[in-house]
Amino acid sequence: MSLRVLAAMSGGVDSAVAAARAAEAGHDVTGVHLALSANPQSYRTGARGCCTLEDSRDARRAADVIGIPFYVWDMAERFHRDVVEDFVSEYAAGRTPNPCLRCNEKIKFEAVLDRALALGFDAVVTGHHARLSDGVLRRSADAGKDQSYVLGVLTREQLAHAMFPLGDSTKAQVREEAAARGLAVAAKPDSHDVCFIADGDTRGFLAERLGAEPGPIVDESGAVVGSHAGSYGFTIGQRKGLHIDRPTADGRPRYVLSIEPVSNTVTVGPRSSLAVRSIVAERPVWNGPLPAPHAPVACDVQLRAHGEVYPCRAQLSGDLLNIELDTPATGVAAGQAAVLYHSDTVLGSATITSST
């Protein structure tokens, strides 16, 4: 069945090939590039780029080669509010956000999809490496490039209007296909890190917006072992860049165990103290093929993008998702997503609020 689809074209190889495949499948495809910065020069460029003027030109050239109409949509104000400001406020609250996940949720599959449906499109096509069949989200065939984790926040309704044509291909196959199609982005490097932090210095970016807020670094006994310029510059499980004055008696490294923004205190300790077995998460989204788990269900959980997968038991309790891990996890940070899987199928997700 031929559909009228909107292809979100970032300027990279994945979205270009996804758009080309959708067109080749007989769909009526229109390409759109999202202008996400009011000042594009402030965003990353070149090999580490995303959403820059260079990317807009690359997307337009790819659309010309594919032979589809192409437009640029200005989403800068929405992106700044829903992604950049959310990123800053989450760190200020002692949490560790995932801006790519938030961009998928709020921009590509809320703002863009809403506008696309209003304009009469049937679906949005993206270059994400994930599989989608009958509205069920599954991991990509390329495990190293799988992006189902950052799509786990999407609702069933959003997935019903999404297309991920690359899910059965490896990244190497996508690049080969792009070259064969004459797409100039075939060898363009992947984007990395946070697109709106031009120099990659997250701590400096946050300090510029939140200001210096000196405070203590303490060990588990409460003894002061160092100081910091702002608790927002740390994340749970961090080992490097702590600038601790007093070494441990056994010489072992310390890790960030907790961040308390009200008292502006960072607590550090041994790696063993990072281990958690119980996780509470809010804003659950149940988008998989199984009914919501009002009784404990055995499944797997991923707690970070490209992170380890842990066997667990999960249960919805009101507006919260309770997760009991079979084996301890480390580096579990509030603000990250907990995405549940059954084998390679996404069951649902929620945002971590606490862990013990």
Image: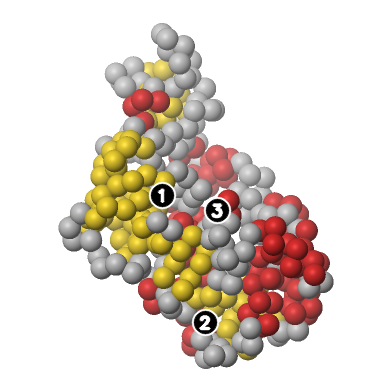
* Residue at mark 1: 302
- Is 147 positioned to the left or the right of 71 in the image? left
The N terminus, quarter of image: bottom right
N-term mark: 2 or 3: 2
306, above or below 180, in the image: above
| Residue 194 locus on image (x, y percent) | 59, 51
Element on which disc 3 rests: helix
Task: Give me the C-alpha separation between circle 2 and circle 3.
Answer: 25 Å
Q: Of circles 2 and 3, which is in front?
A: 3
Residue 168, by quadrant, is bottom right
* Residue at mark 3: 143
Q: Which residue is rendered at x = 67% and y = 45% of the image?
A: 199
Amino acid under disc 3: Ala
N-term mark: 2 or 1: 2
- Is 208 positioned to the left or the right of 259 in the image? right
The C terminus, quarter of image: top left
55, above or below 227, in the image: below
Element on which disc 2 rests: strand
* Residue at mark 2: 123
Task: Give me the C-alpha separation between circle 1 and circle 3.
Answer: 13 Å
The crowd level at tag 3 (other Cα within 10 Å; few <14, some 14-19, many 20+) is: few
Front in this rendered view, residue 124 or 103: 124
- Is 213 positioned to the left or the right of 127 in the image? left
Front in this rendered view, residue 24 or 198: 24
